Amino acid sequence: MKVYISGSKFIGSNYWKDDIPAEAFTKVLDEIIEKEEDVIVCDYYGVDEVVQYYLHDKAYKNVTVYVAGKKTRKNIGNWKEKHCITADDANRFRYFMDKETAAFEDADYGIIAWDGEDNDSYAEMLYLAYQGKKCRLYLMSTEVWIDICSLEDLRPYAGELARIEDEDIKTVLDICGFSEEMKTFLVDTESISDYGIVDVIYNAPIALKKKLNMFRDLLRKRNRKKEYFDLAESYQKEGCDFNKLIKAFRTISSTPDYNCVWNHIQGLMDDMAMVSDRYFKRYDAWEIGAVYSLFSEWYDTDVYMEKSSSDGLFSYASSVFEYIENEEREMKEQSDCESNSWWNRVEYWLLDDEDDSLKHKYDFYIFNGDVCWYEEKEAREQDNGNTYYMKKHKKDKLTELDLNLKTPFKTGDIVLIDCSPFGPPFHAVVLESHNQYDCCFPNIVFKVPYTNDWRCAPLKHMRFYKDAELSFYRPKLSPLYRIRTVLPNEMTKEDESLLTIKALLSADEEKAKKIWRLWGCEDKTYEQVIEIITGADNLMPDEKKDGDTDGDDK
């Protein structure tokens, strides 16, 4: 008989002090030795390592160590080895999983020493049960043996599927700077999905390290055991073979784009951690051939353009931060300079060993002294022979269309729109507030900052500012992070026009729909705005002014 022996990777002093297995466990190992059964063990730490040491101390020879790839991590007794070479070495989970799959298939039964938590050990028991092979489970917490003969025997240990709770959502929204109105509304109405929470964190105007911490806190809630069990139970009912189950388990555990929010979080975390640790740590970040090109950037309200000024080249990330801190200290001392009116962009270039040329790898965006966003770049050769560096992955790009979250605001509400540092804050009146699952709603009426033009546009499209070359300048930060009702004591003389519009709207959603249809695509003067609003009373519900559009393309 061949027996596969494995178990939890992190044993802990609560169970086996000094990695000495409990007597109840070694007694079974002694029985295996007495029967001279063939032992299959892997080359990992935890239970694998403890079992190897015990068998070595007993001078037991009937042992085969299963190894992933060509390099053996642990073979304490110099036993024979079986190397499992996968065709997909780039996938870390698949790389090591193929070794364990071979062990399951070769073994007649299994022995698993489990701490009650380790996901991989639970999956191993599912694998054995799925194949109809008996598994003897040694539960470390109670020091008892349990016979696992079917998937049903493992149901009591699966637990419940994890979910992101209201308290988790409140914490995320609070750290990301949402207003009390938005926090209360999104939680009470359950208007934000798990994927919505992930998007909120990823695009928030906060430091990458804070985003990573929030992702880690959420990921700790995941219960892979229940995911594994439900999948195995479903596949067994469908009569799927073992290889299909193995493939499905690999997908759950290692595929970033798998239809599972936890894998989505893990994929973003891995990418974010790699980028921040390797390329842009605040201290001691340095790589041979690396160049940091620093720019100060702002939206210039005098000429209606995003401006960029080069601040120099640096070899160390710490030097970049020191320069920024010195500049901010000096600028904050100037009374006419608002600290949230600019940001810094850092181009990260790395020397390519193959052709000795610098390659543009990443752009990092720094706000309030921390890296908040980044974009990976890729080289695209042009027809004229030049190489342009463009955004590589969609998930890394700063949002062009806003977060698609609902808001509590209704027709006639006057709200704060704050996308700083990417544009100046301003006040606006909410027009249509229905169908907020659609990215085109709510829409707002506002005076374009630092102009005399009035605009009607969807809030989430962020077409707020004038651009000297284009029809509008779109900020890189969603207004939903800071949107809130403007308080009476915050109203200024410039807001008198908004108050007039609010009064004319009379909180009438149907009237707001008519105004949207009458507006058209062009900016208006204030007099034209009032004419449109008053004229809406005479427009039939489905009537449209000649020559005007529904406004879908605004």
Image: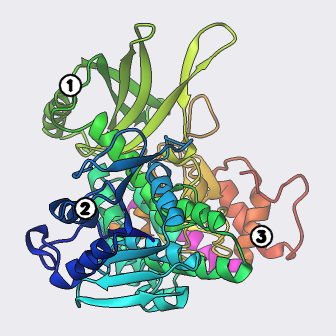
Looking at the image, residue 58 sits to the left or right of residue 130; the answer is left
- Residue type, mark 1 in image: Tyr
Residue 292: which quarter of the image? top left
Say few, some or many: other residues with alpha carbon within 10 Å of mark 1 (under 14 / 14 to 19 / 20 or more). many
Q: Is residue 470 above or below residue 85?
A: above
Residue 269 image offset from top left, x and y in percent: 39, 54
- Residue type, mark 3 in image: Lys
Residue 355 image offset from top left, x and y in percent: 45, 7
Residue 389 shown in magenta: no
Dot 1 or dot 2, earlier in sequence: 2
Looking at the image, residue 78 sits to the left or right of residue 534; the answer is left
Seen at 43% across and 52% down, the residue is 96
Seen at 41% across and 40% down, the residue is 374
Seen at 77% across and 70% down, the residue is 514
473 or 292, which lies in front?
Answer: 292
Q: In this view, does 79 lie above or below 536?
A: above
Say few, some or many: other residues with alpha carbon within 10 Å of mark 2 (under 14 / 14 to 19 / 20 or more). some
**Magenta residues, dominant SS class:** helix
Per the image, the residue denoted by label 3 is 514
**Helix or strand or loop: what does disc 3 sit on?**
helix
Which residues lie in the magenta part? 491-509
Q: Can residue 417 be seen in this view?
A: no
**Helix or strand or loop: what does disc 1 sit on?**
loop
Mark 3 vs mark 2, foreground winner is 2
Looking at the image, residue 409 sits to the left or right of residue 46; the answer is right
Per the image, the residue denoted by label 1 is 316
> Between marks 1 and 2, how big is the CA–CA gap?
55 Å
> Between marks 3 and 1, how big is the CA–CA gap?
57 Å
24 or 201, which lies in front?
Answer: 24
Residue 474 image offset from top left, x and y in percent: 54, 43
